[in-house]
Amino acid sequence: IVAGTILPNSVTPASGSGLSQIFTLEYSDTAGTGAIATVSALFHATFAANPANSCMLSYDRAASTLYLLNDAGTLWMPGTPGTPGTLQNSACFATLGSSGVALTNNTLWLTVAMTFRPSYAGAKNVYMLGSDTGGANSGWQQRGTWTVPAVSATVTADSVTPNTGSG
């Protein structure tokens, strides 16, 4: 495979908020999709060399496997997009059945159905990285923002049945 230039092009949506969202991450390589080795995404407030306790994904094109980094930042948990199941840590989970990959000549689209846990609330940046089969990579680049809302539950006493009576 001829060396090319790999780029993390974009994330759709590029901004927004919510606990759940289907993200489409677009990467391209001038040498074609066969030259793409892995693509990665990090949803985190700031870029950190140690991504422990974050929501970091990686997709291995040759193995057709999606990975989510565990809480300690030491183990990649694998799954196959388009199959039943989820990958999860304390920050987020990816629903595999609603996730998938599409390829054209030079572009790879990774679609991931993400749910963020309320404990991961706050503003997050979406960082993307692409690596090719020759060992070159794009470097981490910010391509979007996402806000995970804080969810607070309010318990109320609304009614009782029966609402009158004796005995």
Image (cartoon, grey):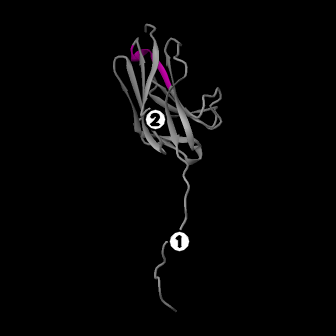
In the picture, the quarter occupied by the N terminus is: top left
The tag earlier along the polypeptide, 2 or 1, is 2
The residue type indicated by label 1 comes to Ala
Q: Secondary structure at mark 2?
A: loop
- Vertically, is 132 above or below 162? above
Q: Residue at x 43, y 26 (%)?
A: 10
Residue 115 visible from this viewpoint: yes
Side of 54 where 24 appears, left or right: left
Task: Out of 57 and 64, give the one closest to the viewer.
Answer: 57
Q: Which mark is residue 157?
A: 1
Task: Out of 155 and 65, give the one closest to the viewer.
Answer: 155
Q: Secondary structure at mark 1?
A: loop
Residue farthest to the bottom? 167
Task: Out of 84 and 44, give the one closest to the viewer.
Answer: 44
Side of 134 where 101 appears, left or right: left
Q: Which mark is residue 15?
A: 2
Tell me if residue 38 is in the magenta stretch.
Answer: yes
The x, y position of residue 157, in whole percent, is: 53, 71
Residue 88 visible from this viewpoint: no
- Vertically, is 143 above or below 84? above
Q: Tag 2: Cα neighbours inside 10 Å, few (<14), some, or many (≥20)?
A: some
Image quarter for residue 71? top right
Q: Do labels 2 and 1 touch, CB within 8 Å?
A: no
The residue type indicated by label 2 comes to Ser
Write the start and end of the magenta stretch as one range: 32-39
Tell me if residue 107 is in the magenta stretch.
Answer: no
Side of 117 where 10 appears, left or right: left
Q: Residue at x 52, y 32 (%)?
A: 67
Real-space CA distance between mark 2 and mark 1, rounded to the nearest whole angstrom: 37 Å
The x, y position of residue 145, in whole percent, is: 50, 33
Count the numbered circles shown.
2
